[in-house]
Image: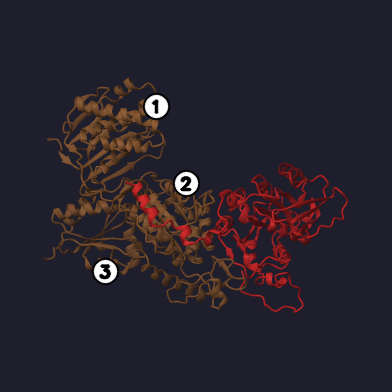
Chain colours: A red, B brown
Amino acid sequence: MTYITKPRLHHPNLPTNALGFTRRDYEGAVSTLCAGCGHDSISASVIQACYELELPPHRIAKLSGIGCSSKTPDYFLGNSHGFNTVHGRMPSVLTGANLANKDLIYLGVSGDGDSASIGLGQFAHCIRRGVNMVYIVENNGVYGLTKGQFSATSDYGSKSKRGVVNHDAAVDLVSLALQLGASFVARSFSGDKRQLTPLIKAALTHNGAAFIDCISPCVQFNNHVGSTKSFDYVREHNEAVNRLDIIPPRTPIEIDHAPGTLEMVTQHDGSVLALRKLDAHYDPSDRAAALAFLQERQALGEVVTGLLFVDPTPKDLHDHLDTVATPLNALTDAELTPGSAALAELNASLR
Amino acid sequence: MSPIARVNDFVVKFANVNGSGSASANGLFAKSILRMGVPVAARNIFPSNIQGLPTWFEVRISESGHLGRRGGVDLMVAMNPQTWDKDVAEIEPGGYLFYDSTKPLPQGKFRDDVNVVGVPLTAMCNAAYTDPRQRQLFKNIIYVGALSALLDIDMAVIEQLVGEQFKGKDRLIAPNMDALHMGRDYVTQNLKPIGLRVKKADAVGDKIFVEGNAAAALGALYGGATVCAWYPITPSTSLAEAFTGYCEQFRTDPDGKARYAIIQAEDEIASIGIVVGASWNGARAFTCTSGPGVSLMTEFVGLSYFAEVPAVIFDVQRGGPSTGMPTRTQQADILAAAYAGHGDTKHPLLLPADPGECFEMGALAFDLADRLQTTVFVMLDLDIGMNEWLTNPFEWDDNRRIDRGKVMSHDDLEAGKDFGRYLDVDGDGIPYRTYPGVHPSRGGYFTRGTSRNPYARYSEEGAVYVDNMERLLRKFETAKTLVPAPVRRDAKRSTKSGVIYFGSTTPALHEALEMLEAQGRHLNAMRLRGFPFADAVADFIAEHEQVFVVEQNRDSQLRTLIMNEIGIDPGKLVPVTHYDGTPITARFVAGEIAAKLAARPIVEAAE
């Protein structure tokens, strides 16, 4: 956490987006994470994504749990309401917030300790309910704030900084999210901003449960030889299945790719996800095939990244509950309280 | 022993096997007496089981309106061989034993001082029905018919109730009527009426007969709750289910869309998490649970206290600790709720005494949670929550407006009002809050469970932390004036003895006070309705030499809370506790207090 607010001054010629905001307007307080931390790169991508999508910052609510990753919402979108909740329980708080006002954008930020250990249950249940949100796990495979214990996403056989070998199987949040019905599932790497920023943009425009597992090396405790979450290891084993460009609604689409190498997915809001295929056979609309592909490649030690699955017309929790268009927190007294006449009838039925 | 002879003042207890369909027959019996204008209290005493274990249904019939448990049984309807001996032993001398006389029982199974009423229920059923399930279900209706003749219950009233009960399933009406008459005719042809009688009266008035859980759910509806997140746990489940029913009825918009969101969460932790998230975002939200759920919610309750996020928890208390006695009643979560959380925390409690107050406090809890920006507990128990009580009709003032507390609006922020999320502007310890998304450039803040300054910026400075904790204490002082005030009931003579009580103990305690008064023992009484305690509580205790604190738990938790919060000499507060899982009785309270008064003689003040 920090108490250092950034100065608001910026270069007068800094470009603004259609709302008149500069990129700086999407920043937050000064990060207190370690120099070189992958999480700061993810924060930078969030800032870039929101700036480019021209989202009004105050219409985004950021929620997190506890841990290094969960500190980061303080470091972006400084004008947005944020909620640093309790360990592993961000998903339920985000679910409640979303129920109260369906009109805001919900960005949940968590880590592998927060979501794969203590919070695995809440992670699973908010995904299976289809809460309309972007859920980013900043995954470094290690407990940073408590100085270097294995987390539940540490790979079997990987080595801690102190040389201890991990004998537990890893929790793969991407596979879980796929099984549980997430309508947008991606994996990325904090060291690849060109891949990550469009994925965050696509997730922000997705109208359902969007999950991004972002491998984010811990420079202090998990960046050594023998770790499978180090910068070097991830760079060497990164197998991106596709490259994504997101084309806003009503923008002319120009295609300059060979036929069959580009897939266009039109989302609910009219935006188009332009997917440049890197693996010719990968189909991000096939959930079962995605799961099988992940299993195969993970067994080979590869880190599969990219947009792994997307359902462009998902249903969210409010669709399931069939709630009114007005946010529940904006209903009037008259809409909420049936009044004395209804009560008199009720009394009569109880005699 | 002469047979007990009483009109409109006796106790009937049904001993059944659960899952045998007895509940609806027993309910029919209780309601028929109510429809004759005679007040009734009906209590289920049931096992944590679906089928095959003993269950009891105790009906207090009291024209004078004593609707707590009295203690003792005047007529036992002994339908469960497993519990026969215990059930027979419970009958008052001169009382009545109603049983199925199909199979002869040895003389040793009866008591000389109890009057036996045998009806060959099984034989009658076997003769009339071939289907085993019908034999089982109609046996219950047959005994209701038999009892109607024995107790002189108006048959037309029962027939009307059967008609109402099976409305829409009309083909079931005739066979139920036949069974009723089968029982009634057997008694009129073979037996004589007994000394217990129901006589038409006009003592019910406009009162309603309803469960506390349903009443609390209705309170939540009227209080403007839009988000409910819950996890099934006895005895609170029917609260969430009732809320669901009321929402479908009253909160569906003309297009069929829901003005509410109800989530059956994966556990109690997620339930309270959803409530905290929704409340943070400006919706009124609640969960309902029991003791084990409160334990699980404790971390979030602490967050709600420190981050100052409203939440409402209905705690329908049951027998603890641990799984304890999940289907039995207790008031044993008082301390767990009042001090839920790690570090220094305390939370307002509302203490309803009947379903009428469950409704009132159910609605009020949401105003208080918003006003105080903290968790408010509404403390029901199984006795109030799951039993139908005769209670005053629900009332609502159509001019009443939802109190959202101190919320800074877009216009306030636009006008340049200074917004410090944890700034005590008004001196009452309550800061202003904003809802997420309210203004493009002002009013945003970061909510956290860690220490921060009045402008919500992270701070580990000791002085900043202490200032904030002191402000939270000021806020709790403000809460004293907002929770429902205690109610005094003074003795007819001046006395130096007092008694403090709350919740479901109330009707039994009021009857006990009359019993004690008849013995020449006078006590002033104070019913607590909320925590933090109003100053009147300390004043009441100061007026008396000894004050009994009557509650349904082992460790006198309310007494501990009073000692701790008001700083009372423990010797002055005399515990009276009842915690076997059955609702407290008037005889128990009167007996305990009489014994303790006798053991500690006090000088009666001169008149």
Q: Is residue A282 visible?
A: yes
Q: Nearer the viewer, mark 2 or mark 3?
A: 2
Quote the CA–CA distance across marks 2 and 3.
41 Å
Quarter of the image holding residue B44?
Answer: top left
- Residue kind at label 2, given as amino acid type: Pro
Residue type at tag 3: Asp
> How many residues crowd around disc 2 within 10 Å: few (fewer than 14), some, or many (20 or more)?
many
Residue B76 image point, x, y percent = 25, 35
Q: Tag 3 or tag 2, which sits nearer the N-term?
A: 2
Q: Toward the viewer: B245 or B117?
A: B245
Q: Going 64% across and 46% down the picture, which residue do you hit?
A: A180
Give SS at disc 3: helix
Residue holding disc 1? B133
Q: Secondary structure at mark 2?
A: loop
Q: Earlier in the sequence, mark 2 or mark 1?
A: 1
SS assignment at label 1? helix
Vertical relation: B203 (above or below) B562:
above
Residue B340 on image: x %, y %: 44, 59
Residue shown at the point (36%, 40%) measured from the top left: B46
* Image quadrant where one finds the C terminus of chain B: bottom left
Q: How many marks?
A: 3
Labelled pair 2, 3 in contact (Cβ < 8 Å): no
Mark pair 1, 3: CA separation:
61 Å
Q: Tag 1: Cα neighbours inside 10 Å, few (<14), some, or many (≥20)?
A: few
Pointer 3 indicates a residue of which chain? B
* Quadrant that contains the N terminus of chain B: top left
Chain of the residue on which disc 1 is drawn: B
Q: Quadrant of residue B447?
A: bottom right
Residue underneath mark 3: B539
Gap in angstroms between the C-alphas marked 2 and 1: 29 Å
Q: Is residue B406 above or below residue B118?
A: below
Give the left or right position of residue B229, taking residue B91 as reference.
right
